[in-house]
């Protein structure tokens, strides 16, 4: 539920359920699994695979609070059999130790099997950071980022005055012996990190640092490099349908004494912070840039990748997914590589990128309207062109120089407006790639599995699949 500050303190009784393995499969798609199988909407998915046990997969998403008469909580699904079956529950509700969670979950496992999560709390100037050491079954708080007093210096110098008018879109990333969180602090982006030395061994988060030149730069991502350096990407500006420029900043020593450096321009996107396209008619989209930094020690070790949405012609709803890479820590960037391989002028949007730490290969996923020509049949639910969407993906095995034939991942076709979700499909999708298997998570109201209690083309359930690289 990004782009809107949280509001109010609330409580709710926890809901616990078990999701059986119910799948839908066609000859051209991987088996789809409806993870949530609950009434009303779930959207904005975070998913993570445990590298110490790849059969352990965790998904956390928003739930529709107002429509259900709820006041807090997020949906969680946990699998210990590679995504075949799921245990599900509401978390951040009923006075549990997560407090009254609002939305915007972000997840990251590290090499020790620590699962870190951040999210929006119902207090507008607080960003909690929680840790699970049992594969997502339980969480404990390890950090709580609050507004620093006026005059508090950053890691090296400067003043945090004026921060935390509200907080939004927190993102967590863990690995290389550290964990970082970055978020929109109601103006500039604000980042903090902590050392990690083993399972459950997390140090204190430092006071945080303002990322330079990031006022009105938001909707971004963060990644850790092979030397522990940190890169963030954000989109300027926050509002409007046109414009849209991507900038990166790099902290060259991570938890060391240096601060983030000045911003580096990467590319124009023609996608503003609220760019309305037919398949996202109520919520709109942003460029949704994402980062992945290769720390594998392989052929492309040190290469950082950036995925994003670009509108080919401003306000024509012809949006495509592109990837660039940098081999010099973000100082310069490659030409753009188009990820989607269709020949239509329909919309592709909300991409997610993940790098397989066992191989260095890349997986990308996104919502895709290529098959909605308004002519009926597969890809069209209502005879209107470009307002329905499916979920698609692709792999790169050559360091992002090219992507293979696109794969239709979702078995059915969804329509966000029919969901009544208020935020359509949401602001982001989910993806975790490990051991040659990509695990996406997306919002879906096609009812292709026959297990959505609201039926087809009503409220959204959370779907996933295991997509093997070929």
Image (cartoon, grey):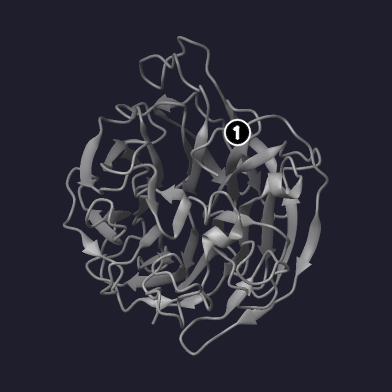
17 relative to 62 in the view: left or right: right
Q: Please tell me in which quadrant of the rendered image residue 407 appears.
A: bottom left
User: Measured from the top left, where is residue 30 in percent x and y?
Assistant: 51, 81
Looking at the picture, tell me which residue is in the foreground, 148 or 237.
Answer: 237
Q: Nearer the viewer, residue 103 or 313?
A: 313
Give whichever of 1, 114 is nearer the camera. Answer: 1
Visible in this render: residue 306? no
| Residue at figure coordinates x 48%, y 46% from the top left | 173
Does 16 sit left or right of 406 as displayed?
right
Residue at the top extreme, as displayed? 151
Q: Residue at x 53, y 79 (%)?
A: 411
> Above or below — where is 170 with respect to 38?
above
Can see residue 150?
Answer: yes
Front one among 270 and 196: 270
Quarter of the image where the C terminus is located: bottom left
Q: Which residue is mark 1?
A: 6
Q: For mark 1, does the 10 Å Cα neighbourhood hold few (<14), some (14 to 19), or many (20 or more) residues?
A: many
């Amino acid at each position: 539920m990004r782009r809107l500050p949280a509001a109010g303190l609330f409580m709710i009784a926890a809901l616990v359920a078990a999701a059986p393995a119910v799948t839908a499969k066609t000859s051209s798609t991987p088996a789809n699994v409806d993870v949530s199988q609950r009434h009303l909407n779930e959207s904005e998915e975070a998913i993570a695979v445990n590298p110490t046990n790849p059969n352990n997969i965790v998904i956390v998403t928003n739930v529709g609070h107002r429509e259900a008469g709820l006041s807090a909580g997020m949906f969680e699904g946990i699998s210990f059999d590679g995504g075949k079956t799921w245990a599900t529950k509401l978390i951040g509700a009923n006075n549990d130790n997560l407090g009254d969670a609002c939305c915007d979950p972000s997840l990251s496992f590290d090499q020790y099997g620590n699962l870190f999560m951040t999210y929006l709390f119902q207090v507008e100037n607080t960003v909690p950071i929680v840790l699970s050491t049992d594969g997502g079954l339980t969480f404990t708080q390890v950090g709580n980022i609050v507004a620093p007093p006026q005059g508090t210096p950053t890691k090296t110098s400067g003043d945090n005055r004026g921060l935390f008018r509200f907080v939004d879109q927190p993102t967590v990333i863990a690995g290389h012996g550290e964990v970082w969180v970055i978020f929109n602090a109601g103006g500039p982006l604000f980042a903090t990190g902590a050392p990690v030395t083993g399972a459950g061994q997390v140090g204190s988060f430092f006071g945080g640092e303002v990322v330079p030149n990031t006022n009105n730069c938001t909707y971004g991502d963060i990644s850790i490099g092979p030397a522990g350096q940190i890169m963030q990407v954000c989109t300027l500006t926050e509002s409007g349908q046109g414009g849209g420029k991507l900038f990166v900043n790099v902290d060259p020593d991570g938890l060391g004494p240096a601060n983030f450096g000045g911003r580096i321009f990467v590319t124009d996107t023609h996608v503003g912070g609220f760019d309305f396209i037919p398949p996202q008619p109520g919520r709109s989209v942003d460029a949704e840039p994402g980062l992945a930094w290769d720390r594998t020690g392989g052929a492309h070790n040190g290469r950082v990748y950036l995925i994003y949405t670009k509108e080919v012609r401003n306000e024509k709803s012809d949006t495509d997914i592109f990837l660039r890479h940098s081999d010099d820590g973000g100082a310069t960037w490659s030409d753009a590589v188009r990820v989607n391989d269709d020949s239509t002028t329909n919309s592709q949007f909300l991409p997610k990128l993940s790098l397989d730490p066992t191989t260095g290969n890349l997986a990308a996923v996104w919502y895709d309207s290529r098959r909605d020509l308004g002519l009926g049949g597969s890809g069209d639910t209502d005879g209107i062109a470009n307002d329905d969407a499916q979920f698609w993906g692709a792999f790169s095995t050559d360091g992002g120089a090219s992507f293979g034939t696109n794969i239709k991942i979702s078995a059915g076709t969804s329509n966000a407006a029919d969901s009544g979700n208020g935020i359509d499909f949401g602001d982001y999708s989910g993806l975790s790639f490990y051991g040659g298997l990509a695990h996406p998570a997306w919002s879906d109201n096609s009812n292709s599995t026959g297990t959505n209690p609201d039926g087809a083309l009503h409220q959204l359930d959370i779907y996933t699949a295991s997509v093997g690289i070929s």
